[in-house]
Image (cartoon, helix red, strand yellow):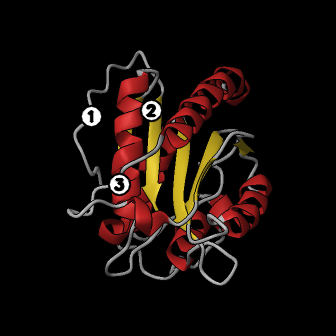
Amino acid sequence: MTERPSENTGERPTLMVIIASTRPGRVGKPVADWLADEVVEHGGFDLEVIDLLELDLPMMNEPEHPVLGRYRHEHTKRWSEAVAAADAFVMVTPEYNHSFTAPLKNAIDYLNKEWKRKPVAIASYGGVSAGLRAATMLRAVLSALGMVATGTTVSIPMVKTMLDEEGVFQANQPLRTAATGMLDELLTLHRTLVTLRS
């Protein structure tokens, strides 16, 4: 499930970046690649990138409520272990019809306690709206799970205009500044929430 290798030192918290789009021609992968580079440069986290296209979870097929943690399927057990091991999250999502993606909702709904009292940030992208309506919908779902969302976000308008000829995302300075602020806030929230989880 790890998109790129990560040096897990055990001394830094683990940040999981989740790529929510699975459609052909998606922009989420280049955006997540840029964010992953920002995480490495920031230096506060060990990095794990989860691509929901590669994770390939079937539509929820567990017979029992996830709050019980009695998972039957190996794909669920693997996903549970990965999320439980992460200390913080960035969810990279486009906006589909004023909301976030079905694969992301499915991946979230598979689990319950694994998400609780963990910090999360949202990096949204789209056209003029920069995916902000998707971020608003997602924030409500994450709050219901007991997650704590950052106030600082990365919101990318007209995202396709920021891809170069090779499809690499080229962030401007305001986006880089926002990413740094978001990661700083995630780290601060982690330091508070980890004591509550323990």
Residue 14 disc label: 2
Q: Which amino acid, mark 3?
A: Phe
Name the image quarter holding the N terminus. bottom left
**What secondary structure is found at the residue carrying circle 3?**
loop
Residue 6, disc: 1
111 relative to 196, above or below: below
Residue highlighted by disc 3 = 169
Separation of residues labelled 2 and 3 (CA atoms): 24 Å
The kind of residue tagged 2 is Thr
Residue 121 position by quadrant: top right
Q: Amino acid at mark 1?
A: Ser
Q: Residue, x 49% and y 82% (percent of image)?
A: 59
Q: Tell which tag, 2 or 3, sits nearer the viewer.
A: 3
Cα distance, mark 1 to mark 2? 10 Å
Q: Earlier in the sequence, mark 3 or mark 1?
A: 1
Q: Position of residue 38 (x, y in %)?
A: 41, 35
x and y percentages locating residue 183 in the rendered image: 56, 31
Label 2 near label 1: C-beta < 8 Å?
yes
**What residue is shown at x 43% (from left), y 46% (from top)?**
171
Query: Mark 1 and mark 3 in contact (Cβ < 8 Å)?
Result: no
